[in-house]
Image (cartoon, helix red, strand yellow):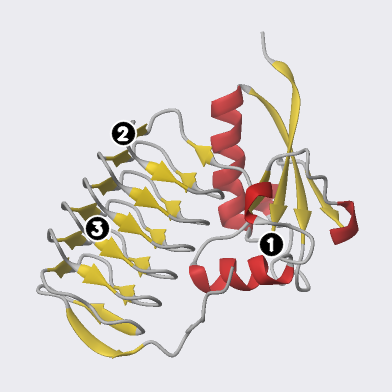
Amino acid sequence: MKSQKNVCQLLGFDPNWICVIHDLLYYNHESEIDLQVFLNIEMQAKLNDHLMEIPIQVKDKSEINNNLPLLFGLASPKNKYPVYQSFSKVLKKKDYTNLIANSSIISLSTQFDKALLMDHQCIVSAQTKIGFGVSIKRGAKIGHHNVIGDFTDINPGVITSGSVTIGKGCEIGSGAIIKNNVKIGDNSFVGMGSVVTKDIPANSIAFGNPCKVIRKNDIWNFNYID
């Protein structure tokens, strides 16, 4: 028998990402989910047909309840970090929640911060450290002794080898493969399907097999402050 409804608070709004969060919450808790959305900017995307069956309330920042689960309602570092900043006067990192799919596996020796979202069938190996506000999407495989920086997104099907370091605010495209001991600097974007065999400097857009820096990342370039 299913339990009563659960409430989760979401900072920021992306209608596609909210559907992912709703389904993860539902399958983890086996109960109906009510989502409360807190906006830092005017809602650009509207409640479209994809959200018709998902209960959503748009609430004011003053109504945040520190006793209820709290997650980002959108993905990508270029979105998550500005939302984090806009709520930083009323929320600290410790106030955020983690959402990890029951079908994923995390090593006992892995350390992870708050606001982690891990989709279905991901694997994280031994002695890995995961920062704040990281999203690891379906089917990603994270190797041993990795370090993943704050606000980074690991997209579906990514595979990292051992001792890989990924900086803050990075986005690793779907299906990318990263060789052992490679370091990727802050604010870098690695394109989908890339094979990364050498270090990628900070603030870069890189892709290909082998992966090469194409140009400077001028889409987002944050100086991350707690």
Q: Is residue 148 visible?
A: yes
* Residue identifier under label 1: 12
Find residue 20 and name its label: none
Cα gap from disc 2 to disc 1, whole angstroms: 30 Å
* Numbered disc 2: secondary structure: loop
Reading the chain from its start, which is encountered first: label 2 or label 1?
1
Q: Residue at 26% across / 53% down in the picture?
A: 146
Which quadrant is home to the N terminus?
Answer: top right
Q: Is residue 47 above or below residue 27?
A: below
Of residue 187 and residue 225, the one placed in the foreground of this image is 225
Find residue 107 and name its label: 2
Cα gap from disc 2 to disc 3, whole angstroms: 22 Å
Q: Is residue 143 above or below residue 164?
A: above
Residue 10 place in picture, x, y as percent: 70, 51
* Numbered disc 1: secondary structure: loop
Reading the chain from its start, which is encountered first: label 1 or label 3?
1
Q: Residue at 72% across / 71% down in the picture?
A: 86
- Amino acid type shown at disc 3: Gly
Query: From the viewer's perspective, is the residue at label 2 or at label 1 nearer?
Result: 2
Does 118 sit left or right of 51 as displayed? Answer: left
Query: From the viewer's perspective, is the residue at label 1 or at label 3 nearer?
Result: 1
* Numbered disc 3: secondary structure: loop
- Label 3, residues with CA under 10 Å away: few <14, some 14-19, many ≥20: some
Does 121 sit left or right of 135 as displayed? Answer: left
